[in-house]
Image (spheres, helix red, strand yellow):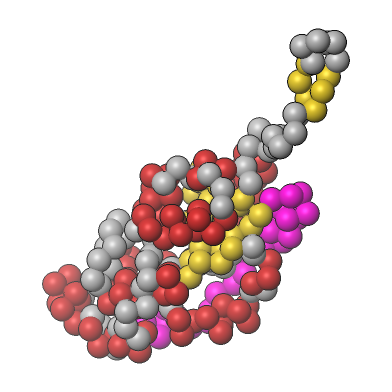
């Protein structure tokens, strides 16, 4: 950044001021770097003859809050993934949904999702442009080996896994933890996520956000934001 010297009128460089609006770009995993888990929810919902939103609430809990649903507890590392299915009965009964018993296995099948390479490839170029990168994901401790196999975690300067830190999106503390690990002001972070509730949570903490509905559109929006 250049300024005018008050004595001589010549341009002088202001030390320590970045010309970039942002310091870090943070990505969600499911629905951003890979295809959405809601694609799988749709399959089991169709099999049961119910709406996707109904099945989503039964299997993964309310979308717009974080509480004691088994899926939420497992994502905070409070219980094992293997125990989720057996605890879904009351939620299914309340919603009038009949479960087969393999729903959680279907959702977590690592062979039935694709990588969104248009965004994964952008991560490396972001680092070459001087941005720090992060991965913030609601996940399970048992899923870490699969995550590490499918994604090069060294691409990220900061990696926050909900099961590791005991907090999940959209809980405020998981965003605060991520911000602290970057060591930057929240307004200097851009975040990409496919779930609206996670976007709202990030915005409440002062982050800039991009709601991902299409990987290609998200990359275009990100590039436009970084160059604005």
Residue drawn at (17%, 70%), measured in percent from left and top? 95
Q: Quadrant of the C terminus?
A: top right
Image coordinates for residue 215, horizontal then vertical, percent: 60, 55
Which image quadrant is residue 54 in? bottom left
Residue drawn at (23%, 80%), measured in percent from left and top? 88
Residue drawn at (57%, 43%), measured in percent from left and top? 188
Residue sitting nearer the eye, 5 or 191: 5
Residue sitting nearer the eye, 68 or 105: 68
Q: Magenta stretch: residue 122 in it?
A: yes
Image coordinates for residue 7, horizontal then vertical, percent: 81, 10
Q: Is residue 144 above or below residue 37?
A: below
**Left-right relation of 165 to 57:** right
Q: Quadrant of the N terminus?
A: top right
Q: Which residues are magenta?
A: 104-131
Which image quadrant is residue 141 in? bottom left
Image coordinates for residue 117, horizontal then vertical, percent: 68, 64
């Amino acid at each position: 950044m250049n300024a005018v010297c008050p004595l001589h009128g010549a341009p002088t460089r202001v030390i320590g001021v970045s010309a970039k609006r942002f310091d870090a770009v943070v990505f969600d995993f499911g629905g951003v770097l890979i295809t959405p888990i809601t694609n799988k929810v749709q399959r089991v919902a169709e099999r049961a003859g119910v709406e996707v939103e109904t099945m989503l609430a039964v299997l993964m809990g309310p979308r717009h809050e974080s509480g004691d649903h088994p899926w939420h507890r497992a994502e905070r590392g409070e219980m094992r993934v293997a125990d989720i299915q057996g605890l879904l009965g009351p939620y299914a009964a309340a919603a009038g949904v009949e479960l087969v018993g393999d729903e959680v296995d279907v959702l977590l099948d690592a062979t039935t999702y694709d990588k969104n390479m248009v965004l994964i490839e952008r991560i490396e170029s972001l680092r070459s442009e001087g941005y720090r990168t992060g991965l913030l994901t609601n996940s399970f401790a048992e899923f870490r080996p699969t995550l590490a196999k499918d994604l090069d975690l060294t691409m990220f300067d900061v990696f926050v896994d909900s099961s590791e830190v005991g907090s999940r999106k959209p809980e405020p503390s998981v965003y605060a933890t991520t911000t602290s690990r970057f060591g930057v002001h929240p307004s200097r972070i851009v975040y990409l996520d496919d779930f609206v509730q996670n976007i709202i949570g990030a915005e409440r903490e002062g982050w800039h956000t991009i709601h991902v509905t299409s990987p290609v559109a998200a990359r275009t929006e990100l590039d436009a934001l970084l160059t604005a």
